[in-house]
Amino acid sequence: MFEKLTATERQYEDLLQRLGSAELQNDPAEYRKQAKALSEIEQLVERFREYKAVTHDIAQTEELAAAADPDMRELAQEELKSLVARRDALMGEMKVLLVPKDPNDEKNVVLEIRAGTGGDEAALFAGELFRMYAKYAERQGWRLEVMSSSDTGVGGLKEVIAGIEGRGVYSRLKYESGVHRVQRVPATEASGRIHTSTATVAVLPEAEEVDIHINEKDLRIDTFCSSGPGGQSDNTTYSAVRLTHLPTGLVVSQQDEKSQIKNRAKALKVLRSRLYEMELRKQQEAIAKDRRSQVGTGERSEKIRTYNFPQNRITDHRINFTTHRLVEVLNGDLSELLDNVLTYFQAEKLKDASVV
């Protein structure tokens, strides 16, 4: 661990020196790249330097406690307790900072929610989940744009795909992927029997063109008349677009915009994100075949969370966490739930990291 810390400190000093050179300052793109690299390790280096200073102070205080008169010895021992506590806290912080960062954490996301088992009740729940994430995004100051949706006509959603842009979106939402289960008495249930329904959530890091290059010859592009609630452009112009990625068979349709060009751009964004997720999954399986991933095996068939309306309860089964703030959570107050999930998976990464 300390070899890594010493090497990181040397890297930090080297970057500082390079950033001060006229050559780098005359190359804005490279300067930004190196400045970003510096900022990513700055906190770790600060903690390491403080750790070394505190360790030095502990050694001096121990000498003082051994040689001083009784009064001074008592003061030194009190000071020693404080210094040791700070040293231990710094050690914990450095371990966390040494865990490799997820390169996708600062990316925007494509959020996909689909009704699962349960018919109309599942679609209603899918709609509630979407509103929950939309309200949370609003609280965070993020921008949400619906890219495509299919409703049931009774307030539910068969499927919705939305883009969310903002700072650290993926880092906050990345563990939401999986099957969400709802238990409640549907409005149409006369006997008061509790029904169980599900909806599937997928949070995909938005892939830039540099991440995933799509060859035009690998695409089949079909255009068709858009369908909707009516209007001058419905069923009159071939503005809707369907993209089929031939190597994988992935199909993306987009018809929200009146412009074929805009629909094609949106469809490409969704396709690129899905292909990127497929590549990430391949890498994760190759690197850590036997390790638990963010949703168990990584398959979306696994239930990650239950929303129990009769008991006003939400339980996240991955981390054994329960809260009785169901109404508040569905209204977008997700911070407590997400914080507990993120803390759990951060601890799991620490267990797997060689620095522990």
Image (spheres, grey):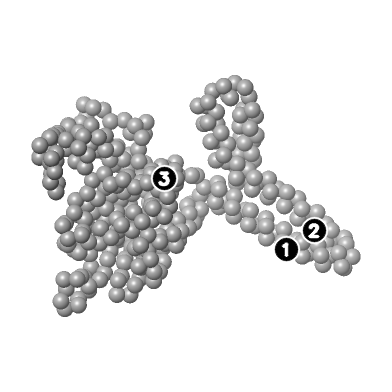
Image height of 94 relative to 29, above or below: below
Mark 3 or 2, nearer chain start: 2
Quadrant of the image occupied by residue 327: bottom left
Q: In this view, does 200 lie to the left or right of 318?
A: left
Q: Nearer the viewer, mark 2 or mark 1?
A: 1
Amino acid at the residue labelled 3:
Gly
Q: Residue at x 23, y 27 (%)?
A: 216
Assign a secondary structure to mark 3. Answer: loop
Q: Residue 184 carries which label?
A: none
Q: In the image, residue 25 lies at what x, y percent?
A: 58, 24
Q: Is residue 238 left or right of residue 281?
A: left
Assign a secondary structure to mark 2. Answer: helix
In whole angstroms, how far apart are the C-alphas of marks 3 and 1? 43 Å
In this view, the residue in front, 234 or 38, is: 234
Q: Name the residue under label 3.
A: 166
In whole angstroms, how far apart are the C-alphas of marks 2 and 1? 11 Å
Say whether marks 3 and 2 touch (CB < 8 Å).
Answer: no
Q: Mark 1 points at which residue?
A: 81
In whole angstroms, how far apart are the C-alphas of marks 3 and 2? 49 Å
Q: Which of marks 3 and 1 is in front?
A: 3
Q: Name the residue under label 2.
A: 62
Q: Residue at x 82, y 67 (%)?
A: 74
Mark 3 or 1, nearer chain start: 1
In this view, the residue in front, 355 or 183, is: 183
Q: Which residue is drawn at 69% across and 48% down?
A: 50
Q: Specify whether residue 264 is in view.
A: no
